[in-house]
Amino acid sequence: MAAVFDKLLGQDHAIRELLAASTDARRSTRGSASIEHSAMTHAWLFTGPPGSGRSIAALCLAAALQCTSPDGPGCGHCAGCTSTLGGNHPDVRRIIPEGLSIATADMRAIVRTAARRPSVGAWHVIIIEDADRLTEGAANALLKMVEEPPSHTVFMLCAPSPDPHDIAVTLRSRCRHITLTTPSTTAIAHALEARDHLDAETAHWAAAISAGHIGRARRLATDEQARSRRATVLAMPPTLDRPAAAINAADTLLATATEDAKTLTAEIDTRETEELRTALGAGGTGKGAAGALRGSAGALKDLERKQKSRATRAIRDALDRALIDLAGYYRDALLASLGTTASPIHPDKSDDITQIARSTRPETLLNCIDAILHCRDTLATNTKPELAITAMLTTISEHMRRG
């Protein structure tokens, strides 16, 4: 098997399809086959739940397409593979939205880039992560290029599902669709042991509580602060049957999400600011250095706006992770109350969950889950987090007080 595809956990069907495509793509670039009737195509759509590896699958296919080894495609060792996986291949561009959406103007600029011929690789690859954040105008701008793509360009879109709410029907119909599934706990644990050199006990614990998300598992296994924030969130449900508990819980949840987001973005923000200031002359000793920095206010403000948008997105993403944890908690309690033997999402919280399951009716637990899912939908419409979170916890508190 091509080495680059080893990064995809539990996706054997997808790997076979991607390997066939990259093999046919290599033949077409060498003139021995045509792309028109092969496993290769110019537009791909990768869908699957969080943690299934949508962006990893796209990056692995990009590396296989750029592979220069005779042992390829996707040897994992040549300059094409390593530079693609390392994020510095000149012909592979990853679009990772840092704000709440991908604007039309941004997509038009990407489309113009996509029309260029590759500089060193065989293909010009455009990977659009979180393609569900495309605005209608941005999707239309992309559609025109996908309908008549340059012969040397490949688009790869990543979205949670092929549902019209996540990806426009017109875009979806022009892409080859690859569906990814949630990797098993065992597969994630083995990956943490092999790649991150974690001991078996820690790896299996992190895998078991990650809900199939290897990135989350890795972070929980290696970051004490991430474990602490999860513990704070999961300590809320037993307290929500008390008067006024919802307000305190909302404050705690928002503060925890904000702290989590700052942890993830602070290093990036600091590096970007320092790089821009250096590029604008900060620290220089020449005659024009001070004047150049004084005239850089506009560039610094633009960077501040970009970082503020990223922070907003990061907080909402952190809130969503917390909500998924809470939904998993009540799901475990519901299954326990019904006496099922399904695997729990939070096995390390079984004592608290069992206690709630014994004292709460199943319909109440189901109503709590509904409130959390409704809050996630509300946050997706850009409602202020403070309002959505407070309303959700108030609803849950009312249900829990009624039992």
Image (cartoon, grey):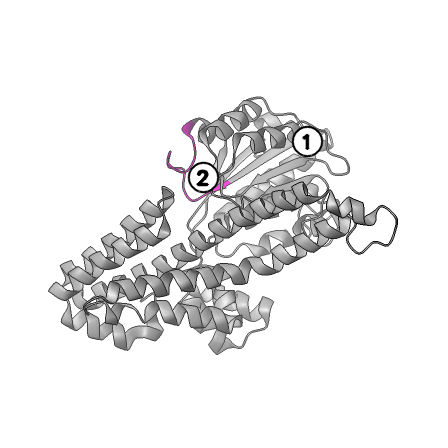
Tell which of 176 and 378 is nearer to you.
378
The percent coordinates of residue 29 (x first, y second) are 71, 32
Which badge, 2 or 1, comes first in the chain's sequence? 1
Q: What is the C-alpha distance between the residues marked 2 and 1?
A: 31 Å
What is the chief secondary structure element of the magenta stretch? Answer: loop
Magenta extent: 158-169
Q: Which mark is residue 343?
A: none
Nearer the observer, 153 or 135:
135
Residue at image location 56% in from the left, 43% down from the top: 18
Q: Is residue 94 left or right of residue 348?
A: right
Residue 326 % position (x, y):
32, 62
| Pointers 2 and 1 in contact (C-beta within 8 Å) | no
| Residue type pointed to by label 1 | Ser
Say if 53 sits above or below 350 in the image.
Answer: above
Q: Indicate the quadrant containing the C terminus: top left, top right, bottom left or bottom right.
A: bottom left
Residue beneath the point at 38% across and 72% down: 231
Q: Position of residue 237 (x, y in %)?
A: 26, 68
Q: Amino acid at mark 2?
A: Asp
Say whether residue 161 is magenta.
yes
Residue of label 1: 28
Quadrant hosting residue 89 = top right
Q: Secondary structure at mark 2?
A: helix
Residue 70 is at least partly visible in this image: no
Q: Which mark is residue 132?
A: 2
Occupied quadrant, residue 396: bottom left
Q: Residue at x 14, y 65 (%)?
A: 401
- Where residue 320 appears, as percent x and y from the top left, is 39, 54
Q: Nearer the viewer, residue 389 or 34?
A: 389
| 46 is within the stretch colored magenta | no
